[in-house]
Image: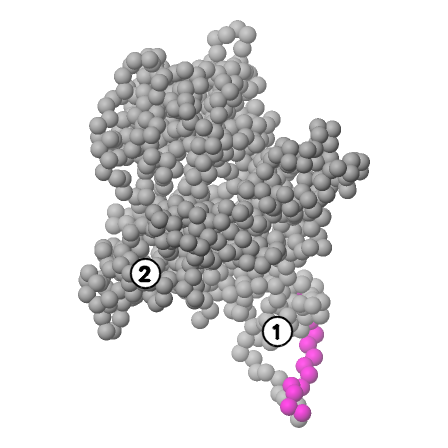
Amino acid sequence: MPPLARHPQGESHGLAAAKLACDKTRRTQRVFPLAKRSKIHSSSALPSREDLVTFIAEAPGKVTKREIAQAFNIKSGDRIWLKQVLKELEDEGAVNRRGKRVHKAGQLPPMVMADIVKRDRDGELVAVPTEWDEEEHGFIPTIVIIPPRKHRPGMPAAGVGDRALLRVDPLKSGDIHHYAGRVTKILAKKQAQVLGIFRAMPEGGGRLIPVDKKAREQELQINPGDEAGAQDGDLIAASVVKHGRYGLPHAKVKERLGSIKSEKAVSLIAIHAHNIPSEFPKAVIEEAERAEHASMAGREDWRDVPLVTIDPPDAKDHDDAVHAVRDEDPHNQGGFVITVAIADVAAYVRAGSAMDREAQERGNSVYFPDRVVPMLPERISNDLCSLRPHVPRPALAVRMVIGPDGRKLRHSFHRVMMRSAAKLSYQQAQAAIDGRTDEVTAPILDTILKPLWAAYACVRKARDIREPLYLDLPERKIVLKPDGTVDRVFVPERLEAHRLIEEFMILANVAAAEALEKAQSDLIYRVHDEPSLEKMRALSEVLASIGLKLPTQGALKPELFNRILRSVDGTEHQLFINEVVLRSQSQAEYSAENYGHFGLNLKRYAHFTSPIRRYADLIVHRVLITGLRLGKDGLPPDTTRAELIEISAKISAAERRAMAAERETIDRLIAHFLADRIGAKFDGQISGVTKAGLFIKLSETGADGFVPAATIGDDYYRFDEKTHSMRGEHTGETYRLGDKVEVKLVEAAPVAGALRFELLTKGRFTGKAAGGRKAAKRPPRGAKKPAKAASGRRAPTRVKVKRRGRA
């Protein structure tokens, strides 16, 4: 039986294959017109291109253009030359750029934070970098840990599961894939418990198979008597009791978590696999329980302002409320005053407290279908800070004056005591606007809801002129039954109410960034870099494979991608191309340095609106309180920029961790859901093509599965990198990226979250077989093979081939 395969992380929809097609002979080609070789005449004292690359490679971390200029004593008159050369080096793939900083492409810096994931066959520890974009580089470098030259008192020995700061060197000159590393500092020791599947042995005891993919090769031995009643196939938590240099580590079962076949175990797998803190320390709980209601001291009284919350129907924490009225200023006729009030978490979570340290470690709340792992204890998140209806709550609010063209004219921040007038769901608010009111929405329709929608219509004008990236991607939602099993998988309808709240939050976030820049305060920005040259090349090839062309003129702006998306709107490729364009984008992150938000087409942006569930927002609240003199519980004045840089990196990593855990949980739950439908037929679309086979996205659930190449029809199929297709060697039948197909489910593996399909749809007939030969017609399945000639070879068979669509 062919093995199950999963879509490469971050490389779905054929982007991995597209990147491999960018060989060295095409490194200098670019989707957009390139500046030719610099014609600026520079003095002989200027560094060579090789000197620049060497300096960037040897610099500790990323460097700025200013730092390069200072190192080589490049005067202001030659800065244009430097900018041009760095641009050329980036286009050639010699360096990478992130914001205003550059570093050598594909190479680890001399000092790197890494996770130790296993021991190799020689017993050596092997690590992988914690911060590494596999999608951008196409590989993950490995680091073999070498013993320290001498023992350092006080520093514990490194082990599997530890996070450490390493000093690294390539194993060979020029090798960017393999490194040797020495531990300079242990940043975090492995959690005491390991989660895995128990496999019983006939003689007693058993083996623990870790559910963490990175540690899958490192089984643990459980001796007889240490099973704690675990049965074969149970999901267990165990502690490592012996971890020698050779042989399997020994573990002891601490807790049985139930059968691995139970959906309730799925989120636990993700929590443990990604080391997501799920239990609050005792000191944090005690601190939360001691918290008292905030007082009116230093606050404006906004309890009569009819703010309302609009959230998902199952939301438990409500951290934002909105209100809008027409502006009565005669100089702003047709304008609005929009108010966004956000839960004042800083009033309860003081900088440096136990709750603050734990929140920073978590970075954000993590949402699974069956549970939420909150950033803050429920006493804070669901009670004291939640903007419940008709209950006084402290808030940090921004009041924004909007012109008739939808542009923000001015804003002001206020520390207030508010009282929500109503708690609404998106569906409830939308129904009221559509004429279906209920007992909650009927009394506030004319006074609260209609002004909100009128203000949104005004704001939308400015948004349409700004033209952010418009991606239309349905989000899968899983509904569970009371017993924890999957009831159904569906795509919720995208409502105007969703867009209203989204636009109001964006306005508030921009106002926060602008206010802090005006106050000359250091802050944490939400940044989104433009797509890299490599990703643009990959996107161009994917589009070309289905007959689309990436525009080659004009500046790189969201508008360019929107033109592509509009060209496929309403076609069979709409969903597929939306996902491909999404994959071509850089990943948004947090940064103490501002380089704008490409996707939103904004010059400055910060997260301000969700401090209950995002630590970045809590930092922005504290900076606002300090910078605008709104209280004494803001960011401590001795906080350095270096600390903000470190926090930005930490919470960006936590966000990626949460996204991966949530995505893997959805995949596993859908595999559980489909496990009893083996043999069922599904409609889908080819979302990726590799030499190994085809990746299929199901239309019904959005689940991804795999069709091994060896199982496709009765022919031998060859992979064509250029066209992202599989073509039959004898028949010429072809399967291309984006083709609609019908498949049969052959196997489902809930633990891996993987599905394997059999292809039922015949490929399109191209008239030529692989290699350009004219296709021979494939004999029907079950037909007798031609008789052999006397020589032992098959007698030649002449087959007249008809092209499809012709008589």
How is the structure coloured here? Answer: one colour
Helix, strand or loop: magenta stretch: loop
Q: Circle 1 — which element?
A: loop
Looking at the image, the residue that sits furthest to the top is 330
Residue at the (22%, 33%) spot, across then down: 286
CB under 8 Å between discs 2 and 1: no
Bounds of the magenta segment: 791-804
> Residue 139: image x %, image y %?
54, 54
> Residue 123: image x %, image y %?
41, 64
Residue at the (41%, 41%) spot, across then down: 654
List the residue tagged with mark 2: 243
Three-letter code for the amino acid on which mark 2 is drawn: His
* Depth check, front residue: 726 or 566: 726
* Depth check, front residue: 542 or 213: 213
* Depth check, front residue: 467 or 176: 176
Residue 278 occupies quadrant: top left
| Mark 1 crowdedness (10 Å alpha carbons): few <14, some 14-19, many ≥20 | some
> Residue 480: image x %, image y %?
31, 47
Labels 2, 1: front one: 2
Residue 432 occupies quadrant: top left
Looking at the image, residue 249 lies above or below residue 283: below
Looking at the image, residue 707 lies above or below residue 649: below
Magenta-colored stretch includes residue 316: no
Three-letter code for the amino acid on which mark 1 is drawn: Arg
Q: Which mark is residue 778?
A: 1
Residue at the (45%, 28%) spot, across then down: 640
Split into 4 quadrants, where in the image is the C terminus?
Answer: bottom right
* Depth check, front residue: 381 or 189: 189
Magenta-colored stretch includes residue 793: yes
**Is residue 584 at all visible to an observer of this figure?**
yes
